[in-house]
Image: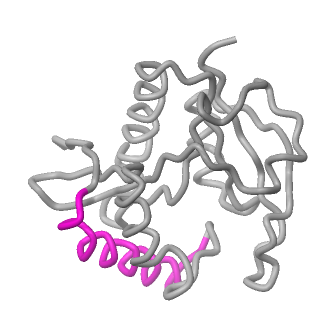
Amino acid sequence: MSIIIEQGIKEDIDELAMLYDDLNDYLQKGTNYPGWLKGIYPIREDATEGIKSKGLYAAKEKGKIVGSFILSHKPESAYDKVNWKTDDDYSRILVVYTFVVHPAYLKKGLGKMMIDFIIQYGVENNMKSIRLDVYEKNIPAIKLYEKCGFSYVDTVDLGLSNHGLDWFKLYEKVLQK
């Protein structure tokens, strides 16, 4: 697998929207660990906003997008009530959003490769830590994050109970003390 991870561009939006739909279709047929819903999350607008903010990265194999994530310095409001492992303003903290792996690439190491990229990016850009949230029943993602050195911090309500998503676990990987 020769994957290149690069910043997303406007021309990637159609393919990213297709990736989101393909993953949501796949999740609806089996166990929907993240609880995502086609047409609700993730959607084309998430890709558009991620590219506009210059935070979206696409993992590509032979020019085809097979994974994606968005890096931001803006936390969910529920993060404010949490006792994190590091204490700094968000200019030195990365928040991971919309972490997506194409169904054909699940269980093939792409998720770990993307997390390793995020960690390296954080180190190279002098970030203090990386934070993310994950739906409490998304066991595969939780195992990946823990395997990559993220530590559980707290469980919060992100206000998505109308979609059946009540509790999210928060994780943090400290890069600098």
- Residue in view at x 43 percent, y 76 percent: 45
Q: Position of residue 88 (x, y in %)?
A: 73, 26
Mostly what secondary structure, the magenta segment? Answer: helix
| Above/below status of 122 relative to 14 | above
| Above/below status of 177 relative to 144 | above
> Along the horizontal axis of the image, is 167 left or right of 22?
right
Q: Most extreme residue toward the top, as rendered?
A: 177
| Above/below status of 172 relative to 63 | above
- Residue in view at x 62 percent, y 67 percent: 34
Q: Position of residue 176 (x, y in %)?
A: 63, 14
Quadrant (top left/top right/bottom left/bottom right) for the N terminus:
top left
Write the start and end of the magenta stretch as one range.
9-32
Residue 19 sits inside the magenta stretch: yes
Q: Indicate the colouring scheme.
A: one colour
Q: How many marks?
A: 0
Quadrant (top left/top right/bottom left/bottom right) for the C terminus:
top right
